[in-house]
Amino acid sequence: MPESAARPDSHQKLPVAVIGAGFSGTVAAIQLLAHLPPDYPVLLCERAERFGRGRAYDTGNPDHLLNVRAANMSAFPDRPGHFEDWLAGAEPDAGVRRTPAGTFAARGLYGRYLGELLAGAVTAGGVPRLHLVNEAITDARPGPGGLVLTSEGGRRHAVAGAVLAMGNLAAPGGLESRHRVDPWRPEGLGRLHPHRPVLVVGTGLSMVDAVLTLRRQGFSGQVVALSRRGLVPAVHAPAGTWPRPDLAPEAASLTRLLAGIRREVAAAEAAGVGWHGVIDALRPATDALWLRLPPPERARFLRHLRPYWDVHRHRAAPPAGAAIAAEIAEGSLVVRAARLLGIEDRPDEARVTLRPRGGAAAEVLDVQCILDARGVGQIAGTGDPLLRGLFDRGLARPGPFGIGLDVGADLAVRGDGSARLWTLGPLARGALWESVAVPDIRNQAAALARIVAAALRPQPVPAYAAVRPVKAACPAISDPDRASAMSPRVSSTP
Ligand SMILES: Cc1cc2nc3c(=O)[nH]c(=O)nc-3n(C[C@H](O)[C@H](O)[C@H](O)COP(=O)(O)OP(=O)(O)OC[C@H]3O[C@@H](n4cnc5c(N)ncnc54)[C@H](O)[C@@H]3O)c2cc1C
């Protein structure tokens, strides 16, 4: 078996692997370097060409803006101004939009920030401790000293444990058409006819991106965007701040919780603070509220309320929001509340059948291509070989409601307990609801590094010795106090 490149000298322990180098994996690796004893190397594995970008920040389109204010995009919870300071030192104003609601940078610029942080971590210190593996990891099994990872190219890496940071899963299936185009690869759009419509499936922030991509590619024709409810993301506004409401007593039922939020919004508005302030104030408490909600109420939330929550919680940067509002006003973007019933491929177009919300009659729409902007898929149906293998071997399992992995409040992946596996970011979303954006993930990364360091410390394992199954403290995810003990140490407002 070819030995991992990350075992440069025999005094070093087996490395801790981080699989995926988007935002989650990049900051997890940096935090691990800071918290692990110095003889533990870190192996950062990424299948894409570029490290430190992930799905969100690997875009060269300057219209793709961060949907969180620059003031809240630091990679470090204990240095809140870190990204803003970096921005001030980057090319002045390149890709930076200043608005009354705050400063919003281009996402590609943020990718550059992460790339520079990573480059600094690779070269820091005398003996290199951060090793980059530019391959997909396709398998992980218990092995001597912890785990053995296998990469796409067949290389094997013996590691003490692994952090799964594979982030946003591929979109769900059910949109098969040869006219379907990946909105994240605009080069696949080809030459579009200006007088034939394009369909975007999904009306959230990914739809906003898709429309901006189409326009940047020179398409001037009509875009039709559809989703079941046809809700478009709200836009950041210069709202005032509002104290964090204590809604824990209301979280026994979704109806009471919703009434509590409405009460807070009314009180805030009476005091001249918009609803945005209340939603932002709730952010640090959301995980604990999510865990307090009884599972049937969480299921109700996912069935009925989630789209409404998402458009208020995940808001567009003002320039992007203004562009979309102008398109809707002019009719160049038509947003439909409708269900997609079927797609029939024709030589030059796709014939799409849809049923408008509340309407009985189906409609037919001929479009020249379809952009899939539905967001992420369910984990149980994932085709990812690494996850499938972990599920098949019982080392991991899908989380509640099929959203992400089953995860303890200590971010340990729940399975049969025979593997040291942790996760963070979107893969932890079923357990910790606020787990998709930078302000939350950076807190998780800092906490995770301390958790991993503590898990490795009590049982130092000599290199290549057989490791005993680790029983990391793994509290029930229904324990909100443990969850909040892990979560934000600094305030986080979007
Ligand atoms: C388009 C978009 C825009 C967003 N904008 C913002 C924003 O402005 N602000 C904000 O706070 N949040 C934003 N988000 C939320 C975003 O989820 C987080 O900010 C963050 O980027 C999540 O990072 P991640 O590393 O967990 O996931 P991802 O970005 O999905 O990265 C996962 C990485 O893992 C790699 N990978 C997957 N499987 C393997 C494997 N088997 N082996 C090796 N590598 C693997 C992938 O190639 C990828 O690079 C946005 C999300 C999207 C999709």
Image (cartoon, rainbow, N blue to C red):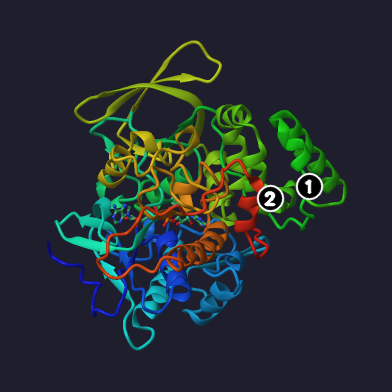
**Could you tell me the amino acid type at mark 1?**
Asp
Residue found farthest to the top = 360
Q: Seen in the image, is 187 located left or right of residue 448?
A: left
The furthest residue to the right? 270
Sequence-first disc among 1 and 2: 1
Q: Position of residue 255 (x, y in %)?
A: 72, 29
Quadrant of the image containing the N terminus: bottom left
Q: CA distance from mark 1 to mark 2?
A: 8 Å
Instruction: Name the residue beneath numbered marker 2.
Output: 285
Q: What residue is rendered at 38% in x and 71% in y?
A: 115
Mark 1 vs 2: CB contact within 8 A: yes
Q: Where's residue 201, x and y in %?
A: 41, 34
Near mark 2 (Cα within 10 A), the count class, few <14, some 14-19 or many ≥20, is: many
The residue lying at 34 percent from left, 89 percent from top is 126
Q: Secondary structure at mark 1?
A: loop
Quadrant observed for ligand 1 in the rendered image? bottom left
Labelled disc at residue 246: 1
Q: Picture coordinates of residue 329 (x, y %)? A: 57, 40
Which residue sits furthest bottom?
126
Is 127 or 375 nearer to us in this picture?
127
Secondary element at tag 2 = helix
Residue 398, above or below 489: above
Give 148 or 17, whichever is nearer the viewer.
148
